[in-house]
Amino acid sequence: MIRNWGLAILITAAGACSAHRPPEIWLPSSPLPVAAVATVQEVDWQDGLAFQEALNLALKQNADLQTARTERDRANAEKVLAEQWPYNPELSTEFSRTIPFNKQEDQRFKVGLGQTFEIAGQRGIRIRIAEEAARRAEAVIVDMERRVRVEVTLAYFQTVAADGRLAIARQNLSLAEKLLNAAEARFQARQVPEIEVNLVKVQYQRTLADQFMRENQSRNAKAELSRLIGEPGRTGYALSDDLRAEPLQEVDRDKARGLALEKRADLAVLRSEEQIALLRVDLESRLVWPDPTVELFYENEKAFFDSPTGGIKDNDNIFGAGVSVPLPIFNRRRGEIMVAEAERRRIEASILSLTHKIISQVNIAVNDLELARKVLDTYEKELNRLSRKNVEDFEKAYRAGEVGTLEVLRAQEDANRVAEGYLESLLNYRNALASFRAVVSADISDLKK
């Protein structure tokens, strides 16, 4: 009996798992979100890796995400650096005697303690810059989590699709082998010419090569998924979720754009950088006025004077204070202020550029999502049914001797294309959903009209 087993198995599996709803995608808050804390339970690898388990593992173990989190530690350390007082007290001493040395020569000793003070509030500005940098580091982590989530989503369902293509290829190979045995038996019975047997042999070899290719694609897809979830050495595990996803709800584009501009963490990163740039312009302006140094000192002078009545010794103790201030005459930090202002304008332009990019990304994501759903509906409503019917009709005709092997092969190739097309439409819809959530940083349920 000749059947399109690949298509039948794919559709049956998709229908059986339609009750599975994909886990809710985590949404960052606005405007400067806090990174999520992943809670990972023990994964039963024998039972298969679920999609939510893959996301949790990635949030905890992904190497790129761990690298981003180290920047938070650095930002917190820089905050401590900004809070500490920038100048230490300075101790100075002086001692002098006249030359040549003798017991009656003059000598002088001085000791001073100096301290430099900031008079324009620079330390407070540096602390505010460090605090904003810490918030920026947190937003960077959230944005990296957003990217990792979409990468894991795409990789997970790409692996599911690769396994589905492999299943179709194996079923096709089994069918091709049965068809080859049937053709050889009919040739031995002199019911078909040898050329039909050769055609079936060619088809069998093509199907075998396709299976080899699909096996390699499945291995590569699983290797990429293993890297993303922080398990690069793990192979040979199964995935427990399928490609089925919730049906599309009509999306409010204006609301989607508004949510994206509000929630996108990469835009929050730039906004934080803009605040840092504004503070740096302020800091450079304050540094125009140099910091004064105040000194307290004690001085002892011993002198010997000759007089007609004999030598006179003089011993003076002096206490005093002094202030030294560099004069901002030649360097008024004009270049530094211009550089800081130029950086502020660059970030401002980057915010505008990313804003336009996000609006475009939202439009494209909605378009792709709507198209993917339309294509998927076409397969589920018409193409799958027609393909099954076509295969069943040729099966009956072949058993009745009304059609030859060539017609059966053509019908099978058409059915294979439909089965793989349906698989790709499921994958494209999953990918479109993942891309939409990443672009908008919100779920479709938040965007219903």
Image (tube, grey):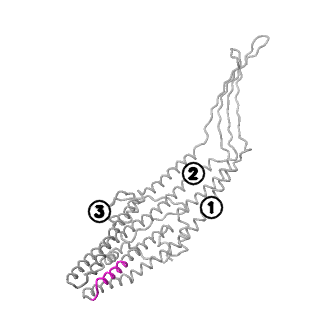
- Could you tell me which residue is drawn at 25 percent across and 77 percent down? 180
Q: Nearer the viewer, mark 3 or mark 2?
A: 3
Q: Earlier in the sequence, mark 3 or mark 1?
A: 3
Q: Position of residue 51 (x, y in %)?
A: 38, 66
Relative depth, front residue between 258 and 414 = 414
What's the residue type where badge 1 is placed? Glu
Label 3 with label 2: CB-CB less than 8 Å: no
Q: Nearer the viewer, mark 1 or mark 2?
A: 1
Q: Which residue is mark 3?
A: 46
Element on which disc 1 rests:
helix
- Element type where label 2 sits in the image: helix
Query: Where residue 53 sits: x, y (%)?
Result: 37, 63
Disc 3 marks a residue whose amino acid type is: Gln
- Image: magenta residue range: 402-418
| Secondary structure category for the residue under label 3 | loop
Image disc number at residue 348: 1
**Most foreground residue, 187 or 295:** 187
